[in-house]
Amino acid sequence: MKKNKTIIYIIAVIVVLVLVNSIASQFYQRFDLTKDNRYTLSDSSKSIITDLDSPLIIDVFLEGDFPSEFRLLQTEVKQIIEEFQLETDQIIINYINPIADETTRQQYIEELTKQGLEPYINTDNSTGKVTQDIIFPWAYASYKDQRVKIPLLKRSITLGLQEQINNSVQSLEYAFADGFSKLVNTKAKKIAILKGNGELSDNYIADFLKTMQPYYNLGKFTLDSVTTNAQGTLDNLKQYDLIVAAKPSEPFSENEKLVLDQYTMSGGRSLWLTESVVMDKDSLYNDAGTSVSIMRDLKLNDFFFKYGFRVNPYFVKDLYSSPIMLAIGEGSQAQMQPIQWQYSPLAASNPKHPITKNLNLVKFDFASPIDTLKNDIKKTILLQSSPKSKLEGAPTTISLADVTKAPDESTYNLGSQNLAVLLEGEFTSVYDKRILPFKVTNFQSKSKPTKMVIISDGDIIKNEVVRNRPLELGFDQLTGKSFGNKEFLLNTVNYLLDDADTGLINIRAKEINIAFLDSDKIKENKGKWQLINIALPLAVLALFGFVFNYFRKKKYT
């Protein structure tokens, strides 16, 4: 009888287990128990891949035996891709080690580098022996007949490797979602590149245009027709979602300003890269090595003042700045050397805003300070000079010879200066309660909710041109360093045009905290921890054996 009960109990347990597994197989649920929701994709990311109708193939080159920091990045990359794969079965992943085969290693390195996938050279001397690893922190995403490259490492010229890895992990979801968006989403938003007021030529904004092209429809727009058909010019401009004014150098007429004002009142967004003082670094490369800065009046002071800011007619000089290459010495003994150039501030970014979070230093040239004025518009400082800044008025003579003299640091005491500001809200028209320069159909004195960014240096968007070929925006050919200008402008445009709640740019605001071991403490206490981890367990084992044998002999002898 007892045996039959046991058999019935075992059969019942088996039946229950089968039923539970059968029911559980019909449901699948994952729970992200991390404090920062590291493994939870945002709704913006999910929406991009919801309607894939053909395979999206990802080739990841971050594969191989890496140092611990890159192993962490490697693990996080695989994890975020798995999260995307759980949303759709159309994602195919290939992990490729481009340097695994010694016979094809050099060929792979050359081909990937030529395609813009610059390798990271990791130098390690922690063991007393210097070793170098070539790492490709990149991925390709392919969909239908298109392919985009996805950077997995956010490089910085000021941060250590651990901080760079931390920033990269925080940006992984955005990096992949941004790449997928280029492939999947159709370009709906339109950007007007303003022309006709002495703006930079296409050759000097070529890399900016190339960067924006995968996301938006771009078109040139001149305001010249306001003299003959002002209302028609305004109606045409309203068809664009954003206007970009890249370093205008000729004054705006009242008719042009009214068109721009009513464009803003209709909810249009704006990106202004403008200056109050005229100076170009190239003008210094003459026999005298000097040039004179002069004030630039674009007739926009009242325009900007009404919206809530003012670009002051000064130069910001900063001790924390980019160097300039100068020939030091005489005759054949002269050598090119980097000398600190206080007129090129390296701007610090606002770490709390999605436009500038985890952003590399942004390089300015002859920037002016921006004052924010009190009104109902929300203002966010995006970029600032360092606290070691001073102002220089115009007109003034600027000489390359002054660079070789040590600056008087006591005069650099005016604190951080605003160089880029975001304005959001409902703007009041510049022409509210004023006589209009031309009759406007349905004049608006108050705008719809809109956004505007003002940057006090047109050169931030300017790429260098060598032999009539544009270089990458933010790349300084003389020093060989890359700055964050391109990423900053891309993030700015994305923020201005994205929906406030579901925009892709908001993924950048996600905070992920990565815990790293302190390498300095590891080196200092290396012997101690080796002793604890190796010698101590052996000593405890020996002590246990001694005590065990002692009591065993005592019991049985």
Image: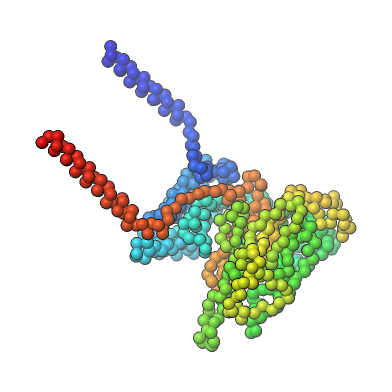
Residue at left offset 54%, top offset 75%: 338
Relative image position of residue 210 (x, y in whole percent): 61, 61
Relative image position of residue 370 (x, y in whole percent): 70, 62
Q: In this figure, what is the number of numbered marks?
A: 0
Residue at left offset 67%, top offset 73%: 280
Residue at left offset 50%, top offset 61%: 159
Front residue of this view, candidates 277 and 144? 277
Front residue of this view, candidates 228 and 312? 312
Relative image position of residue 535 (x, y in whole percent): 27, 51
Quadrant of residue 105 within the rendered picture: bottom left
Of all residues, the one furthest to the front in this rendering is 554
Quadrant of residue 469 within the rendered picture: bottom right
Q: Is residue 100 visible in the rendered structure shown here?
A: no
Image quadrant containing the N terminus: top left
Front residue of this view, candidates 198 and 345? 345
* 412 w.r.t. 40: above or below: below
* 145 w.r.t. 251: above or below: above
Relative image position of residue 474 (x, y in whole percent): 58, 65
Image quadrant containing the C terminus: top left
Is 63 on the left-hand or right-hand side of 293? left
Q: Is residue 487 visible in the rendered structure shown here?
A: yes
Q: Which colour scheme is used?
A: rainbow
* 43 w.r.t. 291: above or below: above
Quadrant of residue 282 within the rendered picture: bottom right
Front residue of this view, candidates 505 and 119? 505
Of all residues, the one furthest to the left in this rendering is 557
Of all residues, the one furthest to the top in this rendering is 1
